[in-house]
Amino acid sequence: MNIVFVVMLLIGIIVETVRNGGDAALASLLEGGNEAVTLCITLLGAYMFWMGLMGVMQKSGLMEALSKRLRRAIGFLFPNAGEAAGAISMNLAANMLGMGNAATPFGLTAMRLLDEKNPKKGIATNEMCTLLAVNASCLELLPTTLIALRQAYGSASPAAVVLPTLLSSALATVVAVILCKVLSK
């Protein structure tokens, strides 16, 4: 992936230099870097808030309560998950709250636990494929990162994306689950 990004960057620099000259290419690079740093600093506050909220939810037991509410769905989606079920439910709960960064460690833990039970190392199990598909479709009840991005760029209504995001992610998740169930047979 690093090679792909380096190639894309080099192509962009070459095209900008050919079209507008070296000074314009350098100005574009500096402006892009400045904008990236500004955006990161702007999003830092939102990330800190949501990660802090996630920590409070975890310590207070709310994440565990949400995880318990997901247990039936986890049993249906991942019938052979075993001890990975807890990490899977925490991963899904964090994703539902739009905190993909907080969900990643739980997803990695779940994959490691699923792989420990895997009789054919190097070949993904149905549960591993389902976890990947459900994470990729990512049912979001509250798209916190998207709301923060919209707020950072001055949107008049940053939360206007909640319903469309919920509908599109719900449809994507349903399709992913159906495909996983059909293909696992």
Image (spheres, rainbow, N blue to C red):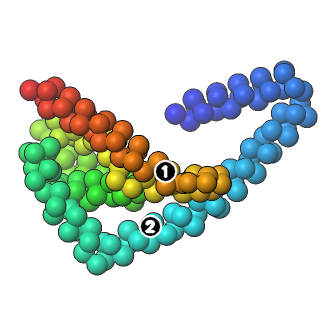
Q: Which mark is residue 180?
A: none
Is residue 140 visible to the viewer in this orientation of the structure? Answer: yes
- 71 and 27: which is toward the camera: 71
Q: Residues within 10 Å of mark 1 (few under 14, many from 20)?
A: few
Camera-near label (1 vs 2) is 1
Q: Position of residue 30 (x, y in %)?
A: 80, 45
Q: Amino acid at mark 2?
A: Met
Query: Which picture quadrant has residue 8?
Result: top right
Left or right side of 29 for 44: left
Q: Position of residue 90 (x, y in %)?
A: 26, 59
Q: Amino acid at mark 1?
A: Ala
Q: On screen, 18 above or below 79?
A: above
Q: Helix, strand or loop at disc 1? A: helix
Left or right side of 27 for 45: left
- 154 and 139: which is toward the camera: 154
Look at the image and tell me in which quarter the C terminus lies: top left
Query: Which picture quadrant has residue 176?
Result: top left
Q: CA distance from mark 1 to mark 2?
A: 22 Å
Q: Earlier in the sequence, mark 1 or mark 2?
A: 2
Q: Residues within 10 Å of mark 2 (few under 14, many from 20)?
A: some
* Contact flag, marks 1 and 2 (Cβ < 8 Å): no
Mark 2 highlights which residue? Answer: 51
Q: Position of residue 138 (x, y in %)?
A: 34, 44
Residue at 16% from the left image edge and 35% from the top image edge:
126
Residue at 22% from the left image edge and 64% from the top image edge:
66
Left or right side of 26 for 176: left
Residue at 16% from the left image edge and 61% from the top image edge:
69
Residue at 45% from the left image edge and 66% from the top image edge:
50
- 100 and 154: which is toward the camera: 154
Q: Helix, strand or loop at disc 2? A: helix
Mark 1 highlights which residue? Answer: 160
- Total tally of numbered discs in the picture: 2
